[in-house]
């Protein structure tokens, strides 16, 4: 087994900048000439000035690390290298092997889980059992969980806490499936935000015994691990990404629904309704790819469809877009529930004017990069007030609408059980929060087709 190539275990706090620790931003990290940098994908409608302000970096430093900008300027989607302000060579570091890091990560994460009142002791007995305790007749399934727990950082971000919740759910799933004939053993890897960690795992022999892998967040990590899994024929279930090209990665199982899948699902449901008029409300200022796809599909089916801005609705100039003779389906996609609460009073006013209205909302917790694959619909009439809508929303998502954070423990439970079902040759799994149905792409990997409409 080769040692992990220069993977740094930080033993000190983040370096102080004017008297306080500098907190890392939520972007993949890399090293260039001993300097730690972010790998930042350029967003739409942003320039060097705004990037410099957001990262607290002079424009001259951005150009120094990205000399191509002098020749052709800034392009949407390209990866920029931006300094974090930390020098790699200044850190107190060691270079452990992958096995060393795995064991340390397990210990750190177990301690964090224990502090979060998890049942780490009982779970540890079932998922980390000693080889000497395994009967010869008992089959052992080796599973890897790879998430950015940020265990080496002095101050962990909110994302790390969510990963711990996910981990808790995954452990509970393993506890539930243990039986006399099969032992499911979990190996935990803290991927941080480093491509080098994933590369080192692929280069070592640590993953050679794995039967399945769950996790990874950042695209550059996913692509490298997907290549390894294809070569080794090990399933890789991605819990948070919907951008991986599963047509070229036969071992990848992609949980998140694509825009096309969501549009196909809601379009099929709308087409079954009678005498409906669709009104898509845009709350983000731009029309989403989902909306464009849906508009095209509904037009082909002869279903009336118009777009309406949130400003038009709030300015009481929306009546022109509604139909007084049919039920109006108000489509809200990738929305936050708090935005829906802003919309409801204006819809109530339209109802008082005699319009029949039904809301169709698809929540995806966009800020957390989590897209649960359900489309939720609720009849909203004069006899169904906002309190009833609140209760229906909370019951469906098993969640509080105030924070709008998904239940990561339920998600971890569902996906771990789904990975195990896939290893057993099963294509469908009904979960606590998400029903998952794997459908293989021709000559490629698997997409979750559990996108469905739940209507009151």
Image (cartoon, rainbow, N blue to C red):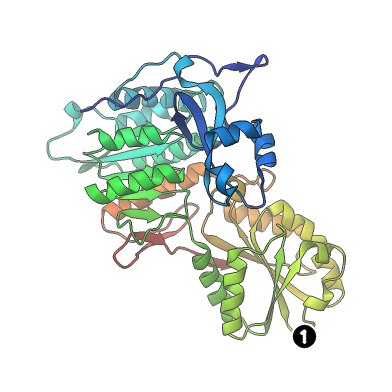
Count of residue discs? 1
Dividing the picture into quarters, in which one does residue 339 lie? Answer: bottom right
Relative depth, front residue between 455 and 359:
359
Residue at image coords 83%, 75%: 319
Q: Where's residue 283, x and y in %? A: 72, 59
Relative depth, front residue between 390 and 8:
8
Q: Where's residue 132, x and y in %? A: 17, 26
Q: Where's residue 307, x and y in %? A: 71, 71
Name, please, the residue furthest toward the left: 136
Dividing the picture into quarters, in which one does residue 348 lie? Answer: bottom right
Label 1 element class: loop
Q: Taking 315 as reference, is 446 left or right?
A: left
Dividing the picture into quarters, in which one does residue 376 lie? Answer: bottom right
Q: Is residue 387 above or below residue 102?
A: below
Regarding residue 80, the answer to whether it shows in the image is: no
Residue at image coords 49%, 27%: 36
Residue with the mark numbered 1: 325
Q: Is residue 211 above or below residue 126?
A: below
Q: Taking 197 as reference, is 388 left or right?
A: right
Q: Where's residue 263, x and y in %? A: 55, 69
Relative depth, front residue between 113 and 190:
190
Residue at image coords 71%, 59%: 389
Q: Is residue 153 above or below residue 293?
A: above
Q: Quadrant of the N terminus?
A: top left
Residue at image coords 29%, 65%: 443
Mark 1 crowdedness (10 Å alpha carbons): few <14, some 14-19, many ≥20: few
Regarding residue 429, the answer to whether it shows in the image is: yes
Q: Quadrant of the C terminus?
A: bottom right
């Amino acid at each position: 087994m080769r040692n992990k190539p220069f993977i740094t275990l930080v033993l000190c706090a983040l370096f102080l900048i004017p008297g306080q620790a500098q907190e890392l931003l939520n972007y993949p990290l890399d090293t260039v000439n001993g300097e730690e940098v972010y790998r930042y994908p350029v967003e739409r409608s942003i320039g060097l000035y705004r990037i410099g302000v957001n990262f607290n970096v002079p424009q001259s430093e951005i150009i120094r690390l990205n000399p191509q900008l002098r020749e052709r300027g800034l392009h949407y989607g390209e990866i920029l290298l931006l300094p974090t302000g930390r020098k790699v060579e200044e850190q107190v570091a060691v270079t452990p092997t992958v096995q060393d890091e795995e064991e340390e990560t397990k210990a750190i994460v177990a301690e964090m889980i224990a502090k979060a009142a998890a049942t780490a002791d009982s779970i540890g007995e079932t998922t980390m059992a000693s080889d000497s305790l395994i009967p010869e007749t008992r089959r052992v399934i080796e599973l890897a969980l790879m998430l950015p727990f940020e265990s080496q950082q002095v101050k962990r971000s909110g994302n790390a806490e969510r990963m711990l919740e996910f981990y808790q759910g995954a452990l509970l799933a393993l506890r539930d499936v243990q039986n006399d004939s099969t032992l499911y053993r979990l190996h935990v890897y803290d991927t941080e935000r480093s491509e080098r960690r994933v590369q080192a795992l692929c280069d070592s022999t640590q993953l050679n015994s794995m039967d399945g892998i769950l996790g990874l967040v950042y695209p550059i990590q996913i692509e490298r691990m997907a290549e390894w899994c294809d070569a080794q024929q090990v399933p890789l279930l991605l819990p948070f990404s919907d951008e991986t090209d599963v047509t070229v990665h036969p071992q990848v199982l992609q949980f998140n629904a694509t825009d096309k899948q969501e549009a196909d699902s809601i379009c099929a449901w709308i087409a079954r309704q009678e005498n409906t008029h669709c009104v898509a409300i845009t709350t983000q200022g731009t029309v989403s790819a989902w909306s464009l796809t849906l508009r095209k599909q509904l037009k082909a089916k002869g279903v009336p469809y118009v777009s309406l801005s949130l400003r038009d609705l709030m300015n009481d100039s929306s009546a022109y877009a509604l139909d007084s003779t049919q039920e109006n389906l108000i489509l809200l996609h990738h929305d936050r529930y708090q935005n829906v609460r802003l919309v409801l009073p204006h819809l109530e006013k339209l109802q008082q004017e005699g319009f029949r209205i039904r809301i169709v909302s698809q929540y995806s917790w966009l800020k957390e990069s989590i897209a649960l694959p359900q489309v939720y619909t609720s009849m909203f009439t004069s006899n169904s007030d906002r309190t009833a809508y609140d209760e229906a929303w909370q019951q469906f998502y098993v969640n509080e609408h105030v924070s709008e954070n998904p239940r990561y423990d339920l998600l971890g439970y569902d996906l771990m059980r789904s990975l195990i079902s896939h290893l057993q040759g099963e294509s469908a799994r009904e979960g606590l929060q998400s029903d998952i149905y794997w459908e293989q792409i021709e000559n490629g990997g698997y997409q979750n087709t559990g996108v469905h409409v739940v209507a009151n």
